[in-house]
Image (cartoon, coloured by chain):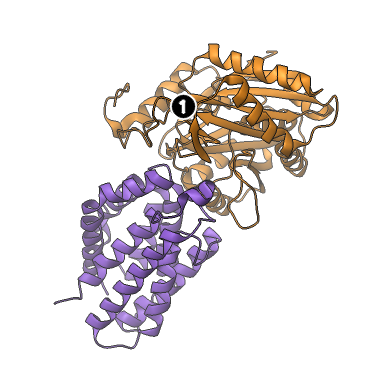
Chain colours: A purple, B orange
Amino acid sequence: MNGDQIFNSINNIQIIIKNHKEEIEKLDQEIGDGDHIFNILRGLDEILNLKEELLDKPVNHIFKQLGMKIMTTVGGSSGALFATLLIGMSKKYSSDLSDLNNLSEMFFEGVQSMKKRGKADVGEKTMLDVLIPVSNNLIELQNETDFEKVANNINNVAKDGMLSTKDIIATKGRASFLGERAKGHIDPGARSSQLAIEAICNQFINK
Amino acid sequence: MKKFVNEVENILTESLTGFGKAHSDIIDVRLSPDFVFRKNKSQNDKVALISGGGSGHEPLHGGFVGYGMLDAACPGQVFSAPTPDQMEAAANEVHKNKGILFIVKNYSGDIMNFEMGADMIEHENQTIIVNDDVAVEDSTFTTGRRGVAGTMIVEKTVGSLAETGALLEDCKIFGDHVNKMTASMGVAFTSCTVPAAGKPTFELSNDEMEFGVGIHGEPGRRREKIKSANQLTDEILETILEDLKPDNNQEVLLHVNGFGGTPLMELYLLFECGQKLLEKKNIKVSRSLVGNYTTSLEMAGGSFTVTKLDADIAKHWDSAVHTPALRWKM
């Protein structure tokens, strides 16, 4: 793992999020207040601006700085949660492990930190409905050598998680104020998280 | 979108800068990280009160910085929680050796960012979570009730107590008490337009309203046909009184808050409806406040807030205050 790969992934995430801007905005306007997409796009712009400064730095340092940047520029729930994810990931990096082992351990740690910060778990109609199953799946597959297979697996788990938010009555976040009215709507944070994972997985599929 | 704007991304900075200049006798504005703070700091040690939240609710919270109320306020992006470094910078600027009291409206984003801010400071600190909106059912399984127009009543009364040199623990207990004695509920006739989005968050037809709406132009509890002011008052105050369960002859503060797009003429009409109804129920409105204090950009509509008064709450409501948006007795 190195700075090039990390920033390449962020680039791909920005492209996929921009391509789905209207959709995410609409999801948020239905059950939230419409700020999610703008917060995400601002965060991506801000961290991509760090590319030159961070490209050659150690991986744990890069993740920590990306987290700090998001923490201080994004705001809202998504800012707090994605910052917590990245800072959590930075703590688990070990230069002795393979990339997939590393990524699994780091992502698991980051998602655990998010659960604590958001006091949320699977089944509450949030981005964690995508991120928790993905982190568990990554741990299971961490010794796999066929990266395309791993990517396909993760992709599917993320999509299932995202779609599962449709029929949940939210108990966390803005959507929880709507009660039954939020039923039938996919959570915008779950959708943007799933798209980010899809962007990363696509780097390993059909290559 | 028709708004006074130069570049959308500069709205907040330009507005905050203007706010600082317009009230330069009372407050100062610091940018990057953004916060508003009191210009004339207290000579005595006191608990420092810091609030904050998404922008778009003006005058909440920056308009309530000054003597007898807040020491600092941290404005986030429109309807988005501020970032932890804003709370850290504000705390370091305004602390006065008796600890920091954060006043936070009950939204996931605000709570998380204030928690992270509290983790970053060395000063002793406590947090009051305001959740006065009875439109949302409270339960241990949900995020719970929202913080809305009752927040400024907590800020006013706890601000007054802090000014007397009270201890952090006592300010925290009093703030939680005022919050429990306070309930709010509102109705929206239109949505509002977040500048970055450029179009209304939702559409309401001419004869519809959102009942039990929050302060972010988010959908309310249910969508209904519009009703007369008396009928709306009945329904809203019934829900509020069910929650507060006032005694016979209970004294209350009645606050009619406009969301930004409704004329004062209608807000006073709504106050008249509310006052009459409470009188019929043997509830005595002995304090009142009518105006646009907790807004939702240009949303039309308004809310009732009722606070049950005891001697302490009444005393701290009546005491002197000098902020950009609330000023009396000095």
Q: Which residue lies furthest to the left in this view?
A: A207
**Type of amino acid at the residue the image marks with label 1:** Phe
Horizontal arrangement in the rendering, residue B325 relative to residue B284 (left or right):
left
**Residue B15: quadrant of the picture:** top left
Residue at the (38%, 31%) spot, across then down: B12
Q: Which residue lies furthest to the top in this view?
A: B265
Which residue is denoted by mark 1 in the rendering? B189
Residue at the (53%, 55%) spot, across then down: A172
State the residue in front, A110 or A65: A110
Q: In which quarter of the image is the C terminus of chain B?
A: top right
Q: In which quarter of the image is the N terminus of chain B?
A: top left
Horizontal arrangement in the rendering, residue A153 relative to residue B261 (left or right):
left
What chain does mark 1 sit on?
A: B
The picture places residue B2, in percent across and down from the top left corner, at: 30, 23
Q: Is residue A57 above or below residue B329?
A: below
Secondary structure of residue under mark 1: loop
Q: In this view, does B45 lie above or below B28?
A: below
Horizontal arrangement in the rendering, residue B238 relative to residue B194 (left or right):
right
Q: In this view, does A197 lie above or below B53?
A: below
State the residue in front, A18 or A22: A22
The picture places residue B104, in percent across and down from the top left corner, at: 59, 42
Residue at the (59%, 43%) spot, across then down: B136
The picture places residue A131, in percent across and down from the top left corner, at: 41, 67
**Residue A9: quadrant of the picture:** bottom left
Whether residue A14 can be seen here: yes
The picture places residue B170, in percent across and down from the top left corner, at: 78, 41
Whether residue B70 can be seen here: no
Q: How many labels does the image show?
A: 1
Tell me the crowding category of disc 1: few under 14, some 14 to 19, or many 20 or more residues within 10 angstroms, Cα based: many
State the residue in front, B108 or A59: B108
